[in-house]
Image: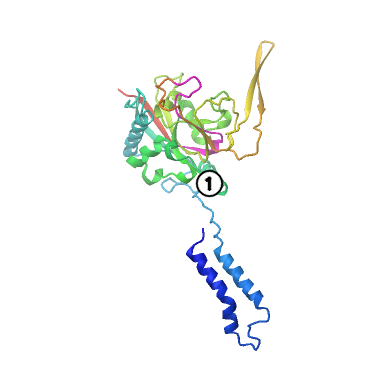
Amino acid sequence: MYSDIDGTFDVLASLIPWWLYKTSPSPEGFICRDVDLQCNLWQAFIAKCRQPQAEQPVRLNTTAPLHWTERELELVDVTPSMQTAMQMLLDDCTVRAKPTNRGAGRAFPFQVVKVERNQNRGLWARYSSTRAHVLAELVSQRLGPVGGHQCPSTAAAMAEHNILGEAGLQSTGVGEFYLFHGVPRPAVQFVTRAGLDSRLANSEGYYGSGVYLADDPEKAAVYSYNQHDPIGPRILLLVRTVLGHAHLTTEMVKHVGRRAPCIAGHHDLVKLEVKRENGKEEIKEHITPRPCTHMECHSMVANPPEGRHSRFGVPQVSGIPCREFVVYSHIQCYPEYVIYLEPRK
């Protein structure tokens, strides 16, 4: 587009030869013998001024949050007001995740009895470094992060009620959101120390072998059941997650392997072969890599078909019953809060 500034530069460039001639003290009427060279240099300078300035690299803070204690690894009990805010978040997200089904308006069936903040500086450093790397990829490839109606319901709930305050600020420019993940109680110590490891995930998952998260706490709480202690408290993790540029789907895409699809939608194909020898079963994976060199997406966001936003609805044969958020690198997650639950009385 030709702007007024461009026109001003053109006028100045056309006047330079006349100005050089009139102001020259030399008998020849020129400041130097090669006036064409001077004009070319001036025009080159103008062209350089017109060039857009290189974008400064966007950086995210990788240091630990200021409200943390000095210890390297610690589970810290939150304040009673924070515990109340967590209950509000769970109740709100349970309703938001089911806006059109018969589960709408249903309260979260558990009450919060305790909340701990996971302060793991080593795990946080790896997570925040990955977050900065994802941001750099988004900027360099000119890709947009998860946004709009694809955002998890936790984002709207936390913004509306100002839950966590400044401590809960998320970098939406990189697609960072809080999501829920349920774990049995014996796994809490391992997860808070080592994180949610996608390498231990089941390869038979609907969207491959990754870390599965949800914006519906009731759905996540299903996976918190401990068969060895069925009456003990259940554990729900509030996980800070970098979704980055996501592959969106409304279909089950089993056997995609341990990588997200590329930006063109291609994915790996995994076939499982079961061999039985001497009464023993052996499962072998045969992986066919995706046939392209496109950039890999950072996550997968699986949305139910229109009008089926909850696990209370009846999904289509090839559809999915509830929203799923899947990341395939365990350092894209940071389990920030451990929420202890008991059934409502």
**Residue 334 in picture, x, y percent from top left:** 49, 38
**Residue 260 in picture, x, y percent from top left:** 57, 34
**Residue 153 in picture, x, y percent from top left:** 40, 35
**Residue 42 in picture, x, y percent from top left:** 60, 72
Q: Residue furthest left?
A: 345
Q: Within the magenta stretch, is there residue 17?
A: no
User: Looking at the figure, which quarter contains the C terminus?
Assistant: top left
The magenta segment: 315-336
Residue 149, placed above or below residue 343: below
**Residue 171 can be seen in this image:** no
Residue 115, picture quadrant: top left
Q: Secondary structure at mark 1?
A: helix
Q: Amino acid at mark 1?
A: Leu
Residue 40, placed above or below residue 278: below
Left or right: residue 258 versus residue 103 is right
Q: Within the magenta stretch, is there residue 332?
A: yes
Left or right: residue 41 versus residue 71 is right
* Residue in the picture at 60% in, 70% down: 43
Mark 1 crowd level (few <14, some 14–19, many ≥20, 10 Å Cα): many
In the depicted view, which residue is nearer to us: 57 or 342?
Answer: 57
